[in-house]
Image: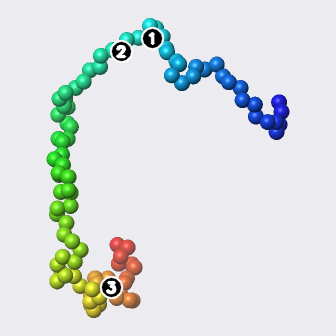
Amino acid sequence: MTIGGKYVWKPDSNPAVGQYEPDLTHVKPKIPAATIKEDSSPYRRPKEQLPAPGQYDAHLTDFGYNPNNMTIGGKYKWKPDSNPPVGAYDIDVAMN
């Protein structure tokens, strides 16, 4: 073992690119595969109808298409809620 020595290239015994020709006489022949052409399960979801190219966003409108529908910075309107006011909440009644 050497530490810090110069790298020495050593060719390996593998064949060069394009030189390898395997012997296929010992390989098993390919077995024909089966294919299922129809859905065999009644529980499968039916295939969805996909929109044509360019039709994905036909239901959307451009930003600001109807400016009468928008409100920006309206005045705050106070709405009272159904919670009891301060001091009116009775813990003993709530536990029952």
Left or right: 41 as drawn, with respect to 80:
left
Label 1 – label 2 distance at C-alpha: 12 Å
Whether residue 26 is situated above or below residue 44 in the rendered picture = above
Left or right: 5 as drawn, with respect to 42:
right
Label 1 – label 3 distance at C-alpha: 87 Å
Whether residue 5 appears in this view of the structure is yes
- Label 3 Cα crowd, 10 Å radius (few <14 / some 14-19 / many 20+): few
- Residue 21: x %, y % from top left: 49, 15
Q: What is the quadrant of residue 36 in the picture?
A: top left
The type of residue carrying mark 1 is Leu
Residue drawn 49% across and 14% down? Answer: 22
Mark sitting on residue 24 = 1
Mark sitting on residue 11 = none
Circle nearer the N terminus (1, 2):
1
Residue drawn 39% across and 78% down? Answer: 92
Circle nearer the N terminus (1, 3):
1
Q: What is the quadrant of residue 43 in the picture?
A: top left
Mark sitting on residue 84 = 3
Asked if the residue under mark 3 is in contact with the one under mark 2, i.e. CB atoms within 8 Å, the reply is no
Determine which residue is flagged by label 2: 30
Q: State the SS at label 3.
A: loop
Residue drawn 28% across and 82% down? Answer: 82
- Residue 31: x %, y % from top left: 33, 14
Residue drawn 45% across and 11% down? Answer: 24
The type of residue carrying mark 2 is Lys
Q: State the SS at label 2.
A: loop
Looking at this rendering, what residue extends furthest in the top direction? 25
